[in-house]
Image (spheres, grey):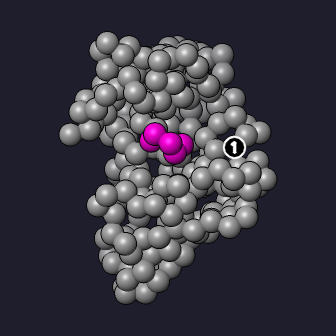
């Protein structure tokens, strides 16, 4: 049972837009802690995709964007491409647990 | 370039110990807080431990408190995870990760090292 809740899977056709939600509580996202997103391609280490709710590291396409509101956050991917097929994780900090927490992950399938 | 390389994984019996290492290069190691994150087979990511840049503070997830110890040697640009009293549920790929300045995100990850706890 992950502290942050994500849908297990989402899918979309090439060129479409998909969103992945991440729901937390008043001790993590709702407490004002930043949300970060990672992309994990099969058999590889996670890669930072979005940091500080809506910032992209250098090299990440602007097709990827993040937002945060209240106790939830979202990752949006526009112009879906086959190479986007991966697992996506949200992450924040939890003051009750005094530790870093992840969502359970969402598998994106490009149809 | 900035890089983290883990080593030390393997197959170990329940109750035994193992020490993981993470070699950092391409950045000023002693300026960054460092973490261990693990991923059980087919499962999601789980934060394990953090050590501050000068090793003044260390924190652990509840399931490893009292069994795991994180440490670093800034003179050698090395991060370690000493794992004692290993359990089957500790079986996972263990990643070392660098924490971004100003944000509590992980911007650099190693390739991971697999730890299997089985008799």
Above or below for B21 versus A24: above
The furthest residue to the left: B1
Q: Residue at x 32, y 76 (%)?
A: A82
The furthest residue to the front: B102
Find the magenta span and give its range.
B100-104
Give the side of residue B22 with respect to residue A92, left or right: left
A72 or B91, nearer to the observer: A72
Counting every numbered tag in the picture gives 1
Quadrant position of residue B78: top left
Q: Residue at x 34, y 50 (%)?
A: A44
Quick one: quadrant of the N terminus of chain B?
Answer: top left
Q: Residue at x 47, y 70 (%)?
A: A65
Mark 1, Cα crowd under 10 Å, few <14 / some 14-19 / many 20+, is: many
Residue A6, x across and y down, in percent: 63, 63
Q: Main secondary structure of the magenta part?
A: loop
Above or below for B47 versus A74: above
Residue B96, x across and y down, in percent: 42, 33
Whether residue A109 appears in this view of the structure is: no
Quadrant position of residue B50: top right
B68 or B84, nearer to the observer: B68
Q: Secondary structure at mark 1?
A: strand
Read off the chain for label 1. Answer: A
Residue that label 1 marks: A94
A59 or A45, nearer to the observer: A59
Whether residue A84 appears in this view of the structure is: yes
B28 drawn magenta? no
Q: Residue at x 34, y 63 (%)?
A: A60
Above or below for B75 versus A82: above
């Amino acid at each position: 049972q992950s502290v942050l809740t994500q849908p297990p899977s989402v899918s979309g056709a090439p060129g479409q837009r998909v969103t992945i939600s991440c729901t937390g509580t008043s001790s993590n996202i709702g407490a004002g802690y930043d949300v970060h997103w990672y992309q994990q391609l099969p058999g590889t280490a996670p890669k930072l995709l979005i940091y500080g709710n809506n910032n992209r590291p250098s090299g990440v396409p602007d097709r990827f964007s993040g937002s945060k509101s209240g106790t939830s956050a979202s990752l949006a991917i526009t112009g879906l491409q086959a190479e986007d097929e991966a697992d996506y994780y949200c992450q924040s900090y939890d003051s009750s647990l005094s530790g870093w927490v992840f969502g359970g992950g969402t598998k994106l399938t490009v149809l | 370039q900035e890089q983290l390389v883990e080593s030390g994984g393997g197959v170990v019996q329940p109750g035994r110990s193992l020490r993981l290492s993470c070699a950092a290069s391409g950045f000023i190691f002693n300026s960054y807080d460092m973490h261990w994150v693990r991923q059980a087979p087919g499962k999601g990511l789980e934060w394990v431990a953090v050590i501050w840049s000068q090793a003044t503070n260390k924190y652990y997830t509840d399931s490893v408190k009292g069994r795991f110890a994180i440490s670093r040697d800034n003179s050698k640009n090395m991060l370690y995870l000493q794992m004692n009293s290993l359990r089957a549920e500790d079986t996972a790929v263990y990643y070392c990760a660098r924490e971004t300045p100003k944000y509590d995100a992980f911007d650099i990850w190693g390739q991971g090292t697999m730890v299997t706890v089985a008799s």
